[in-house]
Amino acid sequence: MKESCGVIGVFNVRNALKVLYLSLFSLQHRGQESCGIVVSDFKKVSIHKGMGLVEEVFSELNFENSKGAFGIGHVRYSTTGCSSERNIQPFVVNYKGKTYAIAHNGNLTNSYSLRKELEDEGTLFQSTLDTEVIMHLFLKSKKENFIEKLIDALKKLQGSYALVIFTPEGIYGIKDPNGFRPLCLGKLDNGYIVSSESCTFDLVGATYIREIESGEILFINNQGLKSYCLPRKKISRCIFEFIYFARPDSKVFGRSVYVTRKKLGETLGKELPFKGDIVIPVPDSGNIAALGVARKLKIPLEMGFIRNHYVGRTFIKPLPASRELGVKIKLNVIPEVIRNKNVLVVEDSIVRGTTSTLRIKEIRKAGAKKVYMAVSCPPIKHPCFFGIDFPSKKELIASDKNSEEIRKIIGLDGLYYLSLEGMLSSISLPTEEFCTSCFTGHYPVEIIDFKGKEQFEK
Ligand code: SF4
């Protein structure tokens, strides 16, 4: 599973280019295919973009002398539109002699019909991004002023979007009315910063103010902050941000990811029908839930898997025949921790089940007596259309198999998934304000024409 993107925007800060560059580092986990920055000193706009990691793309950047005071940035993993140079964000246009740019985290679920309508009217598209649709809708709106045009365009969208928009006068931070993806506001220097996650603020020395509300349009310029509202819809925050995607040192939707992830582990520990001699997490994403499980069960937490941190994006995915080797390169087992023990492995989620199967094999080889697995979310049975790259329904192991069948396939002595109620009760936000579609199949918005919808559902 991959997160679709991370966005960042700053206004009235000392060295916007440097702040944006550092901020993108903190959001790198949300997208590793490409990244970009658009920055301005109110006179000149500079655009920096490229395919690759932040470190690679901006290695030549001289930001120490940059005078830029505001700008936006983006890290991308493609969920809509292919991975190519023309799809790198921020997406930039020149309109009536001025530069506008937009960066998007999420997925529109009606972008193809909107795109078709626009193309039928003669609009030329430069990219295959759903984000470009937003820009055209906005620029083509017949409304009088900027904010009215923006609201007019946003009202036509369905699906998920956390946006930052660059204009000659300032920046916008916008969250869709369902509030699927996180976006928060902080204070920096004499200005402000908006980011997908609050870990950015720690890195650049900003102070967290608050989460941007679902359906809020926040404009930041020389006069300060101004907030507008889109018509209300059912709030549907992505619960997976807490389970897996967001960094544990972040606050998302106004709540600490670390505290929540640990609580998910504690609830899991409370529900578990079995117990081992030791708890071992699958690093890194299972670490904090495992801490909660171990604490609840009062058994030791051991680091039985060691992760190789130098295997990343550039690692060429092994062919099925060498998949075992691929798993071993990423994670290695310490036999001294595992030998002759009843081991309780904590995973954040099971998607296809293939990697888990190989990991469990390694634990058995290392001499475990019994191997159990506890998963800190319910079975994932349905695809996501709101900005997370899930495999198709056919590839999701839980889409047509029950826990007992999955236990046998993975080769476990026991398998337990956190209940839906347990998961929702672990987060200190109203339970009805979460999206849980990948577990339940009940989608909070209509999936009108997501490209490949049929393929995802098969
Ligand atoms: S379907 Fe799952 S991953 Fe997608 S937004 Fe909803 S909770 Fe998040």
Image (tube, helix red, strand yellow):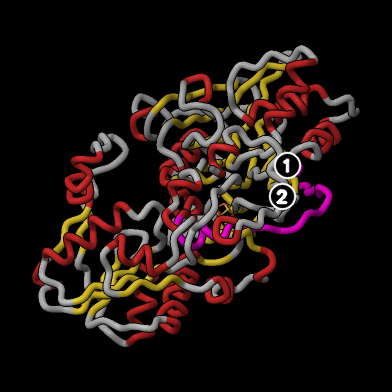
Task: Judge the density around disc 1: few (<14), some (14-19), many (≥20) Cα neighbours within 10 Å.
Answer: many
Region in magenta:
222-244
Report how far apart the C-alphas of labels 2 and 1 lie in the structure. 7 Å
Q: Look at the numbered discs 2 and 1 and tell me whether their residues touch, using CB distance below 8 Å.
A: yes
Q: Which quadrant contains ligand 1? A: bottom right
The amino acid beneath tag 2 is Val
Mark 2 close to ligand 1, CB under 8 Å: no
Task: Judge the density around disc 2: few (<14), some (14-19), many (≥20) Cα neighbours within 10 Å.
Answer: some
For disc 1, the marked residue is: 158
- Residue 97 in the image: state x and y as whole percent: 72, 13
Q: Residue at x 22, y 44 (%)?
A: 323
Q: Residue at x 47, y 72 (%)?
A: 418
Towards the viewer: 260 or 217: 260
Does residue 410 lie above or below 101 as drawn? below
Q: Secondary structure at mark 2?
A: loop
Does residue 250 lie above or below 69 as drawn? below
